[in-house]
Amino acid sequence: MSPRCCKPLATCYPRRTSHPRCGPLDAVPGGPTRMLASMSSGPSRQIGVFGGTFDPPHVGHLAIALEVRHALALDEVWFVVAGDPWQKSGERSITPASIRLAMVEAAIAGADGVQVSTLEIDRDGPSYMADTLTGLTAAHPDYTFHLIVGSDAAIGLDTWHRPDIVAELAQMVVVDRGGREGGRPPTGWPFALVDVPVLDVSSSDLRGRVTEGAPIRGLVVAGVADLIESYGLYREPS
């Protein structure tokens, strides 16, 4: 692994000539669709991979995806919905993957350049990013994948399952919020930084608000709020 590649950024991101914090933001048209596990190879593209439990997905998730896509001039960002999130095993009851997938589809509806992948949902066993990146690379050998992680998750990259594969198959993108510097990957992990506006919302807070009967509209899109209500999600403390 080479040292941190934020300087010069072009070493890792050849399509970009300036740092993501201060460079121009270029919109690229596109549209949300579902990415199936049986994806075929095609022309070279720059793809952001945004994995998570998304229980539930909120406006902050979409803001991160769109900001990273613009800042690094990515062709698309793919939301990868965890099927069996190993890092959250035993913490609480996880909403069924099919419902979380439906919520993500509702959350990104109408947004340019974002899609949702069912790769982890379609695969049996724990959802390891190393396996996901291996599958994506096999399906799209000409694509460059950029793994989007929050600064809190970046600190623990060495604790992930097969971190060597993760480092080999994806270029890391660490998200800071509102100019506040957060955690960084362990030494030896090249990464780029993208700062996104502060949105004071989290999935855990949203679950708590639903349990307490507090409003969540505005923190999630209407389609997500409707699904939460129709399935009766989060009514009991997690």
Image: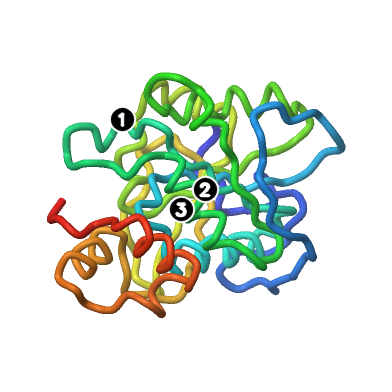
Q: Determine whether, in the image, residue 117 is placed left or right of residue 163.
A: right
At numbered mark 2, what does the secondary structure look like: helix, strand or loop? strand
Point 25% across, 38% down: residue? 88
- Mark sitting earlier along the chain (1/2): 2
> Which residue is disc 2 drawn over?
50
**How much space separates mark 3 and mark 2, taking CA atoms?**
11 Å
- Rounded to the nearest angstrom, the CA distance separating label 3 from label 1 is 21 Å
User: Which residue is identified by label 3?
Assistant: 174
Res 214 quadrant in image: bottom left
Q: Nearer the viewer, residue 71 or 217?
A: 217
Distance CA(mark 1)–CA(mark 2) = 16 Å
| Amino acid carrying mark 3 in the image | Val
Q: Position of residue 217 (x, y in %)?
A: 38, 78
Image coords of residue 12 (percent x, y): 65, 44
Type of amino acid at the residue the image marks with label 1 = Trp
Q: Is 39 on the left or on the right of 211, as rendered?
A: right
Amino acid type at circle 2 is Phe
The furthest residue to the front: 230
The first of marks 3 and 2 along the sequence is: 2
